[in-house]
Amino acid sequence: MQYFKKLKIAPKTKKIIIEGSGVDIDYFNIEPFTNKNITFLLIARLLKDKGIIEYIKAAKKIKSKIKNINFNLIGPKDASNNRVDFDYIKKNHNAKIINYLGFQKNVKPFIADSHVYVLPSYHEGLPRSVLEAMAMGRPIITTRVSGCKETVINNKNGFLIPCKNINILIEKMMWFITNKKKILIMGQKSRNLVEEKFSSKKIDNEFIKLLSD
């Protein structure tokens, strides 16, 4: 909106920001944690810009000190020049640094199996995977970039971290490991935020109102 105003594209009246396409909060409902060990999850195409290498490096550092932590990764291979070398994924999967779970059509059971959702992306629109994890009551670690930063109230439902900063990513992951009781509280705040801002019913109504005016 600010960019459009700067270019004088947007009129002085009738300006509205619609927060993405929304998420079905009835389908993606809060589910109890199914895994006893703290489990982090990242769902993304295997692209460098999704922060996958940072995620794996953080996992390797933490696993060198604490063994019973899970780092799950879901996502399809990608053919672009920005892809993460699949040999790198396999190497870290075989070394038990991450659990690479391939492409999954239905991510819901994997979110239920996780405690904290992580997306260290370099840039996004409004990441749907984050909204789905929030709707299921999971706290979020993501980057302070457009799209991602709209999903997190820092220190309330998760943490916003600088882009490409592995040390702070590790720090926030360790915070959840040592403050396990906060996961449920922050996850509930994620759910509340989705209900307030990102539910598909709310977004649909905003589109209808906009088109009706």
Image (spheres, rainbow, N blue to C red):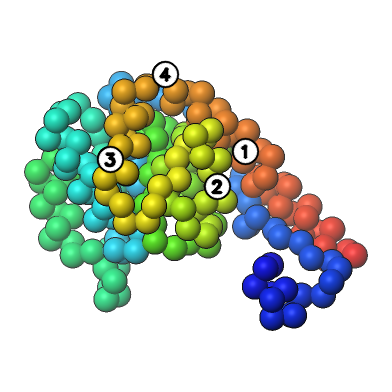
- Circles 4 and 1: CB distance less than 8 Å? no
Residue 54 x, y percent position in the rendering: 26, 52
Quarter holding residue 49: bottom left
Q: Earlier in the sequence, mark 4 or mark 1?
A: 4
Disc nearest the viewer among 1 and 3: 3
Q: Earlier in the sequence, mark 3 or mark 4?
A: 3
- Distance from the alpha carbon under mark 4 to that under mark 1: 20 Å
* On-image quarter of the C terminus: bottom right
Q: Earlier in the sequence, mark 1 or mark 2?
A: 2
Q: Secondary structure at mark 1?
A: helix
Residue drawn where x is 57% and y is 51% of the image: 150
Residue 71 x, y percent position in the rendering: 26, 39
Q: Secondary structure at mark 4?
A: helix
* On-image quarter of the N terminus: bottom right
Depth order, front residue of 113/137: 137
Q: Is residue 36 left or right of residue 198?
A: left
From the image, tell me which residue sits under label 3.
Answer: 170
Q: Amino acid at mark 2?
A: Thr
Q: Earlier in the sequence, mark 4 or mark 2?
A: 2
Q: Residue furthest right?
A: 213
From the image, tell me which residue sits under label 4.
Answer: 181
Residue 78 x, y percent position in the rendering: 29, 68
From the image, tell me which residue sits under label 1.
Answer: 193
- Circles 2 and 3: CB distance less than 8 Å? no
